[in-house]
Image: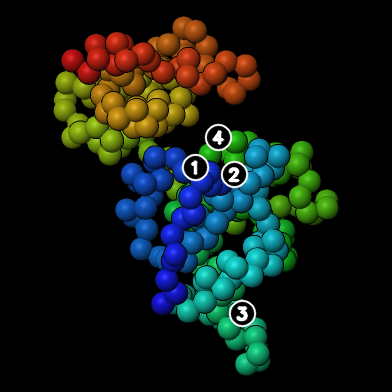
Amino acid sequence: MKTFSGFPIGKLAHTPLPDLFFGELLPSMDNLAELKATLHVFWLMYRYKGTRQYVSLRELLQDGVLLHGLRGISTSPEAESRHVSGEAESRHASGEAALRDGLEAAVARGTLLCLATADSDERFYFVNSGQGRRAFEQAQSGELDLAQGKALLQTAEPQPRPNIFVLYEQNISLLQPMIAEELQEAERTYPQEWIEEAFRIAIEHNVRNWRYIRRILERWATEGKDEGKGKSREKTWYTEEEERLIKR
């Protein structure tokens, strides 16, 4: 096993990850190839600094460091069948098979979205975030031409998005009859993306409280929700004094 000498002293480059990654995705992952592939895509997206919201399979297959780190990881029979022939290429192929297997697992989980050309000779991966989904839809419609005029098809339908009751039980507590009607009313009133983002904000602030989430939704409804154009996202959150009142 190769040992790590430690992080050097001084300022280091870093890649931020959403708290939801550690709270929901990481505990459910049991596929090492999926974890490595997912983290690598997140790292690339941060390096692009918003200039693009996708990474191609071709780019990933040309990344020697990534493939080296995936060698030796057990893969599904379908991934193993993609190995190229020849002893000289077998070690590289094992990394490629693990990469494909990990990406497919991430798409099946819904962490990544994937579009492929009809002959499947190229694939493009997007993080399943607000920005990623917008770029994914633009590529689907042809507004964003990634395959030089070739039509792009979705490789797998995303898993059904959780309704408000699932979000509540996963992030706050067991559902009680007294709160169910209020949750139903909120689901009828606000868009699904608003509800999901309000839950994310509450988790990030460690305020697992429905009143806090409801206040976020009410504020967006009355003052307008920031779509990343102008206002700071901080304006959609609450001061420490407001949080103390809501937590009571």
Way the structure is coloured = rainbow
Q: Based on the displayed image, in which of its 4 quarters is residue 197 positioned?
A: top left
* Horizontal side, residue 235 vs residue 187: left or right: right
Q: Residue furthest bottom?
A: 87
Mark earlier in primary sequence (2, 1): 1
Task: Give the quadrant of the N terminus.
Answer: bottom left
* Residue topped by disc 4: 130
What amino acid is found at the position of numbered circle 4 in the picture? Gly
Q: Which mark is residue 46?
A: 2
Query: Which element is circle 4 on?
Result: helix
What amino acid is found at the position of numbered circle 3 in the picture? His
What amino acid is found at the position of numbered circle 2 in the picture? Tyr
Q: CA distance from mark 2 to mark 3?
A: 26 Å
Q: Which x, y percent locates residue 50?
A: 66, 38
Tell me the residue at 76%/50% (across/down). 146
Q: CA distance from mark 2 to mark 4?
A: 14 Å
Labelled pair 2, 1 in contact (Cβ < 8 Å): yes
Query: Label 4: few (<14), some or many (≥20) within 10 Å?
Result: few
Query: Which element is circle 3 on?
Result: helix
* Horizontal side, residue 73 vs residue 186: left or right: right
Q: Which mark is residue 16?
A: 1
Q: CA distance from mark 2 to mark 1?
A: 8 Å
Q: Residue furthest right?
A: 148
Tell me the residue at 27%/28% (across/down). 208
Tell me the residue at 17%/21% (across/down). 178
* Horizontal side, residue 233 vs residue 170: left or right: right
Task: Give the quadrant of the C terminus.
Answer: top left
Query: Which element is circle 1 on?
Result: loop
* Residue topped by disc 3: 92
Mark earlier in primary sequence (2, 4): 2
Dot in front, 2 or 3? 2
